Amino acid sequence: MNLNLALQKKFCGFDFDVAFRTDSKRLGIFGRSGSGKSTLVNLLAGLLPPDAGRFRFGDRLLYDSAQGICVSPQKRRIAVVFQHSHLFPHLTVERNLLYGYRRIPASERTIDPGELCRVLDISHLLKRSVNALSGGERQRVALGRGVLANPHLLLMDEPLSGLDEKLKYQIIPYLKDVLDRYDIPLVYVSHSMNEMRMLVDEVLVLENGNLASQTSPETLARLRMKECPLGYLNFFSLQNPVPDEHLWAYEWGKNRLTLTHSTSDHKGLFTLASKDIVLFRRHPESVSARNLLRGTVGNIFELDQRIGVELDCNGKPLVATIVKKAAEELGVNPGKEIYAAIKADAFRRVY
Amino acid sequence: MFDLTATDYQAVLLSAKVALTATVLALPVGFLAASLLAFGRFRGKAVLEGILHLPMVLPPVVVGYLLLLLLGQNGPLGSFLRSVGVRIIFTWWAAVAASLVVGFPLLVRAIRIGLEDIDEKLLQAARTLGAPWYDTLLTVVLPLSGRAILAGASLMFARSLGEFGATIVLAGNIPGLTQTIPLAIYDYVNTPDGDHGALALCLLSIGLSLGVLLCSETLTRTLARRSKA
């Protein structure tokens, strides 16, 4: 995706002025509420006319105030998945899904509706009224409706924030699957760092209607560690669990991890808070924690009273946070070998 | 006391015919006008709104007189219609015209209130999925505004049944031709010993209006149930 944009819009008491260009396939827009995220969504989709600027997407010029070009939303081919799905209440699931599909020329319909329904696991819902769906099902149907319009860009505006905390991330594997299979670029808007790290390659951080930074989700997560009570969340993408005396063992690179969770279809994403990792200077011989990893200390960074320690465990990165006093006693320095203990139940399953 | 004469029956049938014709003719334009007021953002919206609502607050006689000036033999529209061989005033079409103008604001207002309840995000979703405004209007707004349209239509129908002031100026009071129920009642009131006839038509008028309201209420409830299911 090649996106080149510089747009201005004045509201009373709020000035939006953002310019950036990107080549990443999955772009995140991150910011607090009131930072201008929704404005950017509306400007991208053409639902809000900018005051001035330019917006080029790939080889199409969608807006240029100097040339008087403003392509209407129905011609932009940018499908939006809204926070509250906004399915058409008078249509069945099937007719909702086909709404955009029927409005593009037959020659451009490259996505097979039946196949997409199987990928999204909504084939059994087709004849239902959309009012009889759960929150997660609604969002999957909304995603399907957007994708079936064969968009040149999929724009998602806080699609998970209306969902149940426990189930909200379950849509992410579906979304990744769909984006990979049909090769659709994504712009993903959210105030959730975790969603950014799971989905996008590059993040734009908005503050007060301006672009504060353009960075990778990893860098942003480390920068924001201070503000998060859990510290930093380590992500583990694990698969093919092997049963191990009521627990489950996974390969993590050349390491072996023991967890209390299993995964349903062999693949899952787990998180581990950096504060749940205990560090030892020497091998502790016996310890109740089921995971003991040997790692080399990489970067060390200060976070108020705590210290963030980056470990390299046989090529896999792991971030732990410890208090300053502990860091002094352990003698944590870059290049030092150290042991990290993690309890089997400290991992949380995301999906 | 229910010994209605032939002209009374004609008045009842004519009233129903006039009210139905006016309502049916007004519906498409009324829906468009209501959509324009509910979703449109343009200069002079307030002025347009004022003009559309004016007949609701003007005395019906004034509306009737203005229509007479417009549609009369020498009026701007009237002379054009005469040149193509159409005469409106003092025919039942004049009663339709009077009802159209007087009832239109009620129709637009009721539909508009219903349209404003529709989530604008749904219309935005339709547009980002490739539907131009007229497509969105037909495939999203129209199906979602059934109750509002029904409410507006029954209000206008009931108002047209009772239209008096504008009708008597524009259509006259010709029994069997332009005499609707209110005009027939007016005739009875002005006739010695006309009390019985007036009362009978009054009761009939009440029954007719009540019937319309009940029908619309039932339909509204059915629609509400369907949109929830």
Image: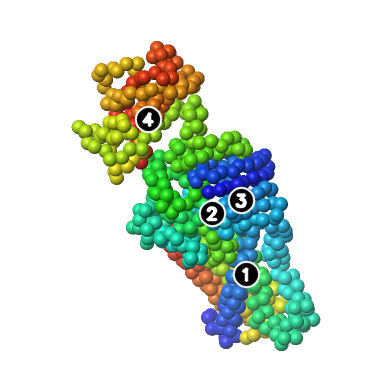
Which of pointers 1 and 4 indicates the residue nearer the eye?
Answer: 4
Q: Residue at x 59, y 70 (%)?
A: B28
Q: In what element is the residue under mark 3?
A: strand
Which of pointers 4 and 3 indicates the residue nearer the eye?
Answer: 4
In the rendered view, does A27 fall on the left or right side of A113? Answer: right
Q: Residue at x 65, y 46 (%)?
A: A7
Please state the horizontal and vertical placement of residue B225, each as a whole percent of the image.
43, 61
Amino acid carrying mark 2 in the image: Ile
Please give the chain letter of the residue carrying mark 2.
Answer: A
Amino acid carrying mark 3 in the image: Arg
Alpha carbon separation for disc pair 4 and 3: 40 Å
* Residue A78 circle label: 2
Which of pointers 2 and 1 indicates the residue nearer the eye?
Answer: 2
Amino acid carrying mark 1 in the image: Val
Q: Give the mark, 2 or 4, whose residue is nearer the N terminus.
A: 2
Please state the horizontal and vertical placement of residue A87, each as a whole percent of the image.
47, 55
One can see residue B196 in this view: no
- Residue wearing tag 1: B29
